[in-house]
Amino acid sequence: MTTNSRNMNRSILVIMTMLCSDKFALAFVAPSSSRMTKNVRTQPQHQPLYVTVEDEQKFDNSLEENELKRAVQIIKSYPDLELTRDRWNGIFDTIEEVTAEAERKNINTRMEDEMQLLSISRRDMSDMYTTLKEQGHLKLFGALNKDNMPANGSHTVQPQMLEKISSTSVDQLTPKASNTMMFAGIGFATLEAVVSGVSGIDLNFLFFSTLMAALADRVFLNGAISETAMKIVSPKTQPKITRHEAGHFLCAYLLGCPVEGYVLSAWAALEDPRFGSRAVSAGTSFFDPVLSAQIQSTKITRSSIDRYSVIVMAGIAAEAINYGQADGGAGDEGALIQFLSNMNGPPSANPAWNDVTIRNQARWGALQAVLMLKEYQECYDALVDALERGGSLGDCIYAIENAAREHGKLPLEKPLGYILEREADEEWVTDLPQPEAQKLEPVKPMNSEESMETLKELKELAKNRVKEIEDKLKRAEEIEEKMKRVKEIEDRLEKLQ
């Protein structure tokens, strides 16, 4: 699939997807010193070098100095290097630091006409994730792909089929606007009216002062004070945000997109250069190296579109699963609409991505995300716990992998089911139907007389067939002879001329 490179660079959200309406953000680019409980490594492709104390010290120094590239080179050369919990966290702390520093220095800044999608820091980050996966440390990273997506087969997902497969309705997956801020505003206005009546302060002055304070909070503090007040009024807001972001985080990880960081509040977003300038209060920053390379080449495959769709819809799916209804995520839907609309390129009367196809793709992505989160529920719960404790990126990745080991969670050997297109509707099956074997009529035994009669018939048919072939050969010879005569006549005419 092709798209205009300039249009893609301007609006595809490349590293950061803004989730405007609910202030959640999906960034796309989408504890202790105890030893890890278990390190399972794959057999290295080359003869491993013996790890010395000096080599271990070099690796530790590279992490302390945030030299991610050098750390990748060392761990590749020494696949038997022991990853203690401190080293594990050090690796992911370095990833957070180098990607944030790259953003701070504008290496990864999205420019209006040209965007550097695959920066050096993100290339090194992707290399580290891949190396850890190859060495057996990250069992679930990239566990799912187009071949073992939970719901394989047709991409057509009608609302009834979505609910049948996932036990989640389209209505539950449609973000509903929260009235918390409206009620809080009414309550605050009432309080101001009471204060004005008691103190004699002009009510208009109080309203104007409040308006200016809210505007200053939005401009200078990214709405952090308003967000804090909202969380006090509605204590359930923060757990919803956490579970929403956990959905993005886990699905990005399962689909092989390196996660580089997250924030769960406007205060944290202010301190993180990947989020601070984007007016968001929560976000997950991940990087898809394949999609980034395809955007630069202006040729985006369906599998990359699918991967992005699942990750974007994962926050909504997580809320629907945990609370029965998605509140946040309107910005997610908007990001997906913008992304797919830019696939159309120049304006057309019949664009490939229109209202119908975009809605279907959103349902397809939400379906996959719901099934992923349910299939890896234990990993999701462990991730939520790590996020609630304010864990680092390393803590979050460790929580996912440790839960996978404890509960025997592995990459899917095959899809959970298949969506088959029928004449009037779709059908959900857990196993593909096997093609029916061709039924052969049993051969009736013949006596000697019947056999002789059959042989005579076959002999007569053969003689007739041979005669037909001989007649055709004879006609062909006659035609060939006539062609020779015509050729001779043409030669004579040429000589006369």
Image (cartoon, grey):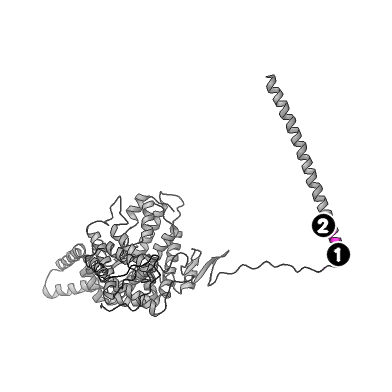
**Helix, strand or loop for the magenta stretch, by majority:** helix
Instruction: Estimate the spatial distance between the alpha carbons at disc 1 and disc 2, rounded to whole Å.
Output: 12 Å
Q: Does the magenta stretch include residue 355?
A: no
Count of marks overlaid on the render: 2
- Residue 16 appears in the figure: no
* Disc 1, SS: helix
Q: Which of marks 1 and 2 is nearer the N terminus?
A: 1
Give the left or right position of residue 161, taking residue 220 as reference: right
Residue found 42% across the figure and 65% down from its top: 365
* Front residue of 258 and 58: 58
Q: Does the magenta stretch include residue 448?
A: yes
Residues drawn in magenta: 443-455
User: How crowded is the residue under tag 2: few (<14 C-alpha within 10 Å), some, or many (20+)?
Assistant: few
* Front residue of 63 and 391: 63
The residue pinned by badge 2 equals: 458
Residue lying at the far left of the rendered structure: 200
The residue pinned by badge 1 equals: 450
Type of amino acid under label 1: Glu
- Residue 91 appears in the figure: yes
Q: Quadrant of the N terminus?
A: bottom left
